[in-house]
Amino acid sequence: MSQNENLGRCSARVYAGSFTGHPCTRNAKVLREGKPYCGTHDPVAIADKRKAKHAQWDQEAKEKGIRWAAEEKRRKAIQQLCGHIPTDELDQYELVRKAGDSQQ
């Protein structure tokens, strides 16, 4: 008999389509602060997954910021070169150019 079998069932409550919820039916794998938890409801595992996801989102936001800054720099350069052309006409030209590039 292994140690995990002695822990019994997970102590978390599952609220899937009901207001009152029901106990998790999975066998417990770990004890956290005296309560047994399965792998899905383990608070430490949940915190680790959340931390990893936030790190991924931060990296994606940083990459988007770099791309946005490069695009803004390009737009300012175009505006300086074509200062007499209104911005909305430049935007229309850009849309037509992108549409032509996607068809090729």
Image (cartoon, rainbow, N blue to C red):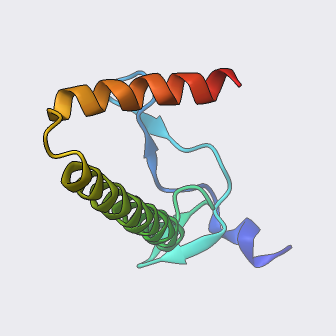
Q: Position of residue 70 (x, y in %)?
A: 37, 63
Q: Does any portion of residue 19 appear in the rendered image?
A: no
Q: Position of residue 25 (x, y in %)?
A: 62, 43
Q: Nearer the viewer, residue 57 or 80?
A: 80
Q: Nearer the viewer, residue 8 or 39?
A: 39
Total numbered badges shown on the rendered structure: 0
Residue at (31% x, 63% y) in the render: 69
Residue at (70% x, 70% y) in the render: 6
The reply, left or right, for residue 97 in relation to residue 86 is right
Residue at (64% x, 68% y) in the render: 7
Q: Nearer the viewer, residue 47 or 51?
A: 51
- The quadrant where residue 3 appears: bottom right
Q: Position of residue 28 (x, y in %)?
A: 63, 62
Picture quarter with the C terminus: top right
Q: Position of residue 48 (x, y in %)?
A: 50, 73
Residue at (36% x, 27% y) in the render: 93
The reply, left or right, for residue 77 in relation to residue 3 is left
